[in-house]
Image (cartoon, rainbow, N blue to C red):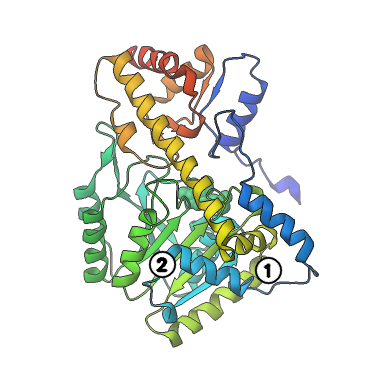
Amino acid sequence: MFEMLTAAPPDKIIALMGQFREDPRPGKIDLGVGVYKDAKGDTPIMAAVREAEKLLYERQSTKTYVGMAGDPLFNAAMIGLVFGDGADRARIRAAQAPGGSGALRILAELIARSKGTTVWLSDPTWPNHVPLIRAAGVTTRDYPYFDAATGTVRFDAMIAALKGAAAGDIVLLHGCCHNPTGANLDHGQWEAVADLLVSRGLFPFVDLAYQGFGDGLEEDAFGVRLLASRVPEMAVAASCSKNFAVYRDRVGTAFLLGRNPAEADIAFSQLLSVARGMYSMPPDHAAAAIRIVLEDGKLTESWKSELESMRRRMVLLREGFADALRRQSNSDRFDFIARHRGMFSRIGATPAQVEKLRKEYGVYMVGDSRINVAGLPEDRLDTLAASIVSVMAEG
Ligand SMILES: Cc1ncc(COP(=O)(O)O)c(C=O)c1O
């Protein structure tokens, strides 16, 4: 049977990780893979999560199944984190899921079961959105999003394209920290998007994978919370991979907001039936630890302050790198990097220039010139900026 198959193309980022590992040059710089890194290049376990894991070890008396929706108390804590105090909780349902990806995947299936046919994705978007959503049998279309020349959101073009969407179409929005561009909607733009979604009968599907990595935990939830206060229905996929640094443990949450509690219950029963048919029940280890963190005032404070220091480090790296690029290029063309938020920015290099940076300077970034700002070397920003400016000047 397997002779019927041809090999699937390798994942580009995983392949890049392999090349980086094998590169013997001591000064090599990894700006590729999408995980947070500290100044030493490590991705540590957060102190509050480690503490919660110790408590879990002492307290957990069983590892029996958690149920299709996972732990209701984890889900309640996540509703608070994402939707805040002002939300209409009677209309919100939440299911623990295997990472943000698992949440996106089951919500895409729910959309398909609800007869949704077309999901609009930003151009560009996180490449994995496409397979995760198309696997449910729905079509994807693109709306313009990023202007590479200025590093800003092409907001008018985005709105114009979405005006062409049919009522009932789904619009996928990055809740904050847009991946791969780092360019985000401001408050006024979120308001305008909310107006458009409501007036055209479009369904928002928000991917919130970096809450706390942009402008802060509350601020990064602005878009989700605004939409939840305005639209009749929506779906949200949240990931805990980055903001709790529990990547490999796989935890996220799939949320839905129904028009009323009865419809929310029906939709939720379908969401759980989707989960049943895909993985039955979500992994629980990190979710259990996160629940402990969020239920314990001291651990919550410790987690928030560590997350805030990670966020500030990324903002400072952005500012330092934009300064270095300004010095090296004698221009302000890279200033957008300091204005962007989240873990990523696209620096605007061509694929050939990206390749040259890797080969000649040991600087690794994704082919679309996406850099992970957490990987920037604090002590070598000018050297790195000089290599980038020199390669990009060659055309
Ligand atoms: C935009 C976006 N959404 C969702 C995810 C999913 O994260 P995970 O499945 O690891 O929780 C990621 C991870 O890189 C992402 O960048």
Percent x, y of residue 302: 55, 51
Q: Which residue sits at x=35%, y=65%?
A: 225
Percent x, y of residue 350: 38, 24
Give residue 208's mark: none
Q: Which of 344 and 166 is in front in this view?
A: 344
Q: Which residue sits at x=19%, y=49%?
A: 156
Q: Report the residue marked by disc 2.
A: 84
Amino acid type at image mark 1: Met
Q: Residue lying farthest bottom?
A: 262
Q: Which residue sits at x=38%, y=51%?
A: 176
Badge 2 density bin: few <14, some 14–19, many ≥20, Cα 10 Å: some
Hey, which quadrant is residue 388 in on the image? top left
Give residue 281's mark: 1
Badge 1 density bin: few <14, some 14–19, many ≥20, Cα 10 Å: many
Amino acid type at image mark 2: Gly
Hey, which quadrant is residue 392 in on the image? top left
Number of labels in the image equals 2
Which of discs 2 and 1 lies nearer the camera? The answer is 2
Q: With 167 as the anchor, is 386 left or right in this view?
A: right
Percent x, y of residue 151: 28, 35
Q: Nearer the viewer, residue 214 or 391?
A: 214
